[in-house]
Amino acid sequence: MGGEGGVQVQIDGPVGGRVARVRLSRPEKRNAQTPETWLALAAAGASLPGDVRVVVVSGEGPSFSAGLDRSMFAGIGSGTSEGDDEFLARIASYQAGFSWLRRPDFVSVAAVQGHAVGAGFQLALACDLRVAATDAQFTMAEPSLGLVPDLGGTQVLVDLVGYARALEICATGRRVGADEADRMGLVNLVVPPDQLDGAVDDLVAALTSGVHDAVSATKSLLLGAPSRTYDEQLLAERRAQMSRIRALTAGSAHGPDSQP
């Protein structure tokens, strides 16, 4: 599907359990991102077939994404003539290119090699799971440029590594290597660069082997857990389980070949 904004989308796998592979495709720019990239990512999410079960996000070439395309800075003041509502709406349209990756109807996986800087780091954070090559380096560069991370990365970073570590990473703009990222829980798996594709394929196979509706319901429970009290989470679990048991019972009533 297309290549607008430096984003390519390929759908493969069997009907009912397909995999969407979203690839940043500007290797000559180390997959640096522009507003067109973010709008293309949002369009990719909006156009996904309903039977996609896993989304894999990757970058073509040696870098996952080197962050913002520096050519953007020439026109960075163009939005100052906008009213507040228009300015905020424009940023929201960019954030939509990242936030769809948290939808519960699929599991998203970032395959990260080389540089994951700024917007690239936030794109990896937008995914549910991260598989990193040993040469991966994560950097939150926005504060060093006088900006803030505004593509959804701040909350996820705090959830993963805690407030103090997240602040230190952002405020210093230092590089976090793959091994350190693994130790602090920023990534799920680290492999040699030549094994990255195979490791992601193995993870995709494992993710698509389960009962999709159960995985989706579990993702919803986990995403909502931080905003609920313990008793509220117990209630959410009860309701989700009731729904699953009823679906399984209804499926079995249609015969041995029924699928939940």
Image (spheres, rainbow, N blue to C red):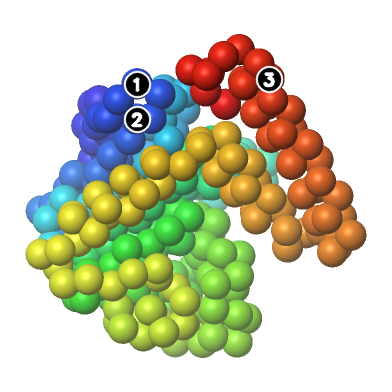
Q: Is residue 167 above or below residue 4?
A: below
Q: Is residue 15 above or below residue 29?
A: above
Circle 2 Cα neighbour tier, 10 Å, few/some/many (<14 / 14–19 / ≥20): some
Residue 106: percent from the left, percent from the top? 48, 39
Mark 1–mark 2 distance (CA, rounded to whole Å): 6 Å
Residue at 51% from the left image edge and 37% from the top image edge: 211
Contact (CB < 8 A) between labels 1 and 2? yes
Q: Is residue 63 above or below residue 72?
A: below
* Residue type (three-letter) at the residue carrying disc 3: Ala
Instruction: Specify whether 30 is left or right of 224.
Output: left
Instruction: Specify whether 27 is left or right of 233.
Output: left
Residue 57: percent from the left, percent from the top? 32, 48
Tell me the residue that label 1 is attached to: 15
Q: Is residue 52 visible?
A: yes
Judge by depth and name the residue closer to the eye, 95 or 189: 189
Contact (CB < 8 A) between labels 3 and 2? no
Residue at 40% from the left image edge and 41% from the top image edge: 209
Q: In which quarter of the image is the N terminus?
A: top left
Circle 3 Cα neighbour tier, 10 Å, few/some/many (<14 / 14–19 / ≥20): some
Residue 250: assigned label: 3
Q: Which of marks 1 and 3 is in front?
A: 3
Q: Residue pushed farthest right?
A: 231
> Which quadrant of the view contains residue 195?
bottom left
* Residue type (three-letter) at the residue carrying disc 2: Arg
Residue at 44% from the left image edge and 73% from the top image edge: 186
Mark 1–mark 3 distance (CA, rounded to whole Å): 22 Å
